[in-house]
Image (cartoon, rainbow, N blue to C red):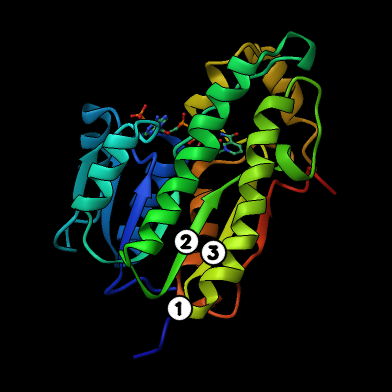
Amino acid sequence: MIDNPFSLEGKTILVTGASSGIGRATAIACSNMGARVIATARNEERLQATIAQLNDAIDGHMMLCADLTSPEELDGLVKSLPALDGAVFSAGNSVTLPLQFGSRDKFDEMLNVNFYAPVELLRLLYKKKVLNKGASVVLLASIGGTHSFMPGNGIYGASKAALNSVMKYAAREFASRKVRVNSICPGMVDTPLIHRGTITEEQLAEDAKRYPLGRYGQPKDIANGAIYLLSDASSWLTGHDLVIDGGFSI
Ligand SMILES: NC(=O)c1ccc[n+]([C@@H]2O[C@H](COP(=O)([O-])OP(=O)(O)OC[C@H]3O[C@@H](n4cnc5c(N)ncnc54)[C@H](OP(=O)(O)O)[C@@H]3O)[C@@H](O)[C@H]2O)c1
């Protein structure tokens, strides 16, 4: 048999934000690459819809509902988890608001879900040794944090830039246990997230034309990057932010 370094066979992978968009596509892709998936998000019905699409040739997929901005629910989630070989932190939200109309509350709202929640989860998974030796963690950041600074994206971008910074520190600190930490910085990806903001469908269609490869990303474009970062194919990669943006940030 030919060895496939991208296989996730035998690995147990946690996916947050698994009820929608990039998280759902990642959970499905992980199961198709052979992983047992632990899917989490708040909405039970949408999470159930993800579980129904996982590869059922693999035993033991689980769903666990939790609001990651609630310290009690996040703690409860960590206590319910089996040992993990990998995790993808996709739960998040966005806001489009020029800085002059922002407020401390708006920053808090974004930081709570996009920064404090994933950082606390990462910290607890490592500290409580839920992450096995050699595990790989993938954080969903954004080109809006580090590579592209479009007006109105500052509050969201700041939350993702902060996350990317923690990613690099965690990569240094967790390397002693061979735990790898990387992030993916996507450009615009066609998920419910981009359709529920203030940007109109016409503006989105126009914006997509500015991408060198002529389109926005699909959730599976990002899921495939996550597979690489979770798999042994990337075993010498840590502290890296993988830009997947159809060439937008060139
Ligand atoms: N789409 C893009 O263009 C784009 C670009 C760059 C980066 N990203 C990042 O990629 C990640 C995934 O985005 P997406 O586009 O897939 O968005 P999405 O379709 O809106 O999915 C977001 C997910 O996060 C979960 N979630 C939100 N708040 C939560 C909370 N408090 N606790 C637990 N789960 C929560 C949602 O589930 P429930 O509602 O069921 O809780 C949902 O599963 C986000 O971090 C986003 O910032 C997206």
Q: Nearer the viewer, mark 1 or mark 2?
A: 1
Residue under label 2? 137
Label of residue 181 in the image:
3
**Residue 9 location in percent, x, y?**
30, 73
Quarter of the image where one finds residue 8: bottom left
Residue under the image location 73 percent in, 8 percent down = 101
The part of the image, by quadrant, that contains residue 234 is bottom right
The one of 102 and 63 positioned closer to us in this rendering: 102
Q: Nearer the viewer, residue 54 or 193?
A: 193
Q: Which of the two discs, 1 and 3, sits closer to the camera?
A: 1
Q: Are dots 1 and 2 in contact, CB under 8 Å?
A: no
Q: Return the residue nearer the eye: 156 or 224.
A: 156
What is the x, y in percent for residue 180?
Answer: 52, 70
Residue extending furthest bottom?
1
* Residue 53 visible in the picture: no
Q: Is residue 134 above or below residue 186?
A: below
Measured Cα–Cα span from mark 2 to mark 3: 5 Å
Q: Position of residue 20 (x, y in %)?
A: 39, 34
Q: Please name the residue shown 53% across and 22% down the image.
A: 109
Q: Amino acid at mark 2?
A: Val
Q: Give the residue drawn at x 67%, y 18%.
A: 96
Judge: label 1 CB < 8 Å from ligand 1.
no
- The relative height of residue 133 versus residue 215 in the rendered view (above or below) is below
